[in-house]
Image (cartoon, rainbow, N blue to C red):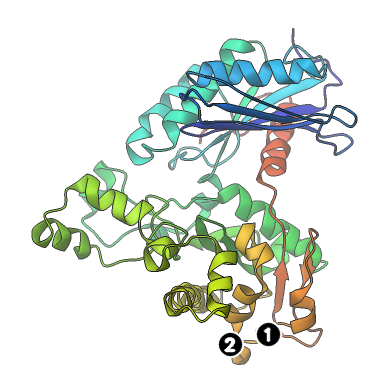
């Protein structure tokens, strides 16, 4: 069954290595009839959590879910339980989060066999993410082969970077042969947040320059000029850039050679060290900013140093991207830490008053789930908090593409 002409709902799927997150969004009335998660795929203790429409409440069950195909079927069953099944005529499309789109995909893209084959060719530059995304796409297409399915790429927003920002200073032939360059990630978040920041300032995205700081367990910064990304902190992989929960961020690449020579570590050992045993957890044993702040208040020096290293890196990127943009209208904080940690926001701009950056202590202390300014009225540069909504951004891009008549708009360029 295909969606009717009046279909207004989009199912957003985010397939990870051992989980599937999903949301059903109605693009007409703004509601989310279903939000859920399948986690610990491949284990005996797999868990399915679903929050249905008003009145349906929350359901949770555990039991073995062997693979992603079974996980997607579990999602379909949960939706069907509330009358929202994949055969619903109200379902317009399925939008898939795909982490890596390389240079070829710069916009939301209707998934065909050829598109899927190209996503597979990108696996070597995204071995931890694209395989799971591909599995989710294949399973969803098998369940609803007649329904439009759209890939929305984390990297797409960053394809507007000029070559001088995207290129690494290594041999060009080697770089091109192995697709080595800065791609950037968290693109759907940066796109959504930069646009909402412009709205908060009462301007069009084309009129403003913003620095977006997406600070979660994974963290990235972007410089956005007139609605287009001109630089971003993550690179070939999500390891580069800011200090993160478990990732090191920027590091001298020779450290890897040193560890192999002196410590006898293998490539896999170094990979695990930099991606899973570094960042905040490597510095102080915790990657939860709330716990780190609690420990600082109790006088824990390792937590204090970890926080100072984290903030120091933030300041460096704010300053660097200020220089890249030339004029900055707003610095915007988003994601779990960015939205909820007032001490991080305060510390990140402290000492940058000469750049026009300052926060109002009272405004900064307010907890809210709506976009807001935390800088005083007289501040030359706005400091803002904008809660991110990657699922809504994926749904919007998917619905816009499908609603355009599926004439090929948004296909790989």
- Could you classify mark 2 by the number of other residues whose Cα lies within 10 Å: few (under 14), some (14-19), or many (20 or more)? some
Residue 326 has which mark?
none
Q: From this view, report whether residue 72 is shown above or below residue 265.
A: above
Q: From this view, report whether residue 123 is shown above or below residue 342.
A: above
Q: List the single residue furthest toward the top.
A: 1
In the rendered image, the quadrant that contains the N terminus is: top right
Q: From this view, report whether residue 216 is shown above or below residue 135.
A: below
Q: Percent from the top left, x then y, of residue 343?
A: 63, 76
Question: Which residue is disc 2 drawn over?
Answer: 352
**212 on left or right of 134:** right
Q: Percent from the top left, x then y, of residue 369?
A: 79, 58
The alpha-carbon separation of the residues under discs 1 and 2 comes to 7 Å
Q: List the single residue furthest toward the front.
A: 298
Residue 23 makes an appearance in the image:
no
Residue at coordinates 69% horizontally, 68% vertically from top-left? 208
CB atoms of marks 1 and 2 within 8 Å: yes
Question: Which residue is disc 1 drawn over?
Answer: 358
Q: Nearer the viewer, residue 169 or 289?
A: 289
Res 198 → quadrant: bottom right
């Amino acid at each position: 069954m295909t969606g009717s002409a009046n279909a207004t709902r989009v199912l957003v799927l985010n397939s990870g290595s051992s989980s599937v997150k999903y949301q059903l969004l109605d693009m007409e009335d703004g509601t989310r009839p279903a939000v859920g998660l399948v986690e610990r795929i491949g284990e005996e203790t797999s868990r399915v959590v679903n929050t249905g429409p008003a009145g349906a409440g929350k359901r949770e069950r555990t039991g073995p879910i062997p693979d992603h195909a079974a996980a997607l079927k579990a999602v379909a069953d949960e939706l069907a339980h509330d009358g929202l099944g994949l055969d619903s005529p109200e379902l317009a499309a399925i939008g898939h989060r795909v982490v890596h789109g390389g240079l070829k995909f710069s916009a939301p893209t209707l998934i065909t066999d050829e598109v899927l084959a190209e996503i597979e060719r990108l696996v070597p530059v995204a071995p931890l993410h694209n395989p799971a995304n591909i599995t989710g796409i294949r399973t969803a297409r098998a369940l609803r082969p007649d329904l439009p399915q759209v890939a929305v790429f984390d990297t797409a927003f960053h394809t507007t970077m000029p070559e001088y920002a995207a290129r690494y200073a290594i041999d060009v032939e080697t770089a091109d042969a192995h697709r080595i360059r800065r791609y950037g990630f968290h693109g759907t978040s940066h796109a959504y947040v930069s646009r909402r920041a412009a709205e908060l300032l009462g301007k069009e995205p084309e009129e403003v320059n913003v620095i977006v700081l997406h600070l979660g367990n994974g963290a990235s910064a972007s410089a956005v000029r007139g609605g287009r990304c001109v630089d971003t902190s993550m690179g070939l992989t999500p390891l580069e850039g800011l200090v993160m929960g478990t990732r090191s961020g920027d590091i001298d690449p020779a450290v890897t050679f040193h560890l192999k020579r002196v410590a006898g570590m293998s490539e896999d050992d170094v990979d695990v060290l930099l991606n899973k045993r570094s960042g905040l957890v490597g510095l102080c044993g915790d990657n939860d900013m709330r716990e780190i702040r609690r420990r600082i208040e109790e006088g824990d020096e390792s937590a204090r140093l970890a926080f100072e290293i984290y903030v120091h890196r933030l300041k460096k990127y704010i300053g660097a991207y200020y220089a890249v943009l030339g004029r900055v209208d707003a610095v915007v904080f988003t994601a779990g830490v960015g939205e909820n940690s007032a001490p991080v926001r305060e510390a990140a701009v402290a000492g940058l008053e000469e750049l026009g950056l300052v926060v109002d202590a009272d405004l900064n202390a307010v907890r809210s789930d709506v976009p807001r300014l935390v800088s005083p009225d007289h501040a030359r540069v706005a400091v803002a908090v904008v809660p991110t909504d990657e699922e809504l951004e994926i749904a919007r891009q998917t619905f816009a593409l499908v609603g355009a008549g599926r004439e090929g708009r948004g296909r790989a360029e």
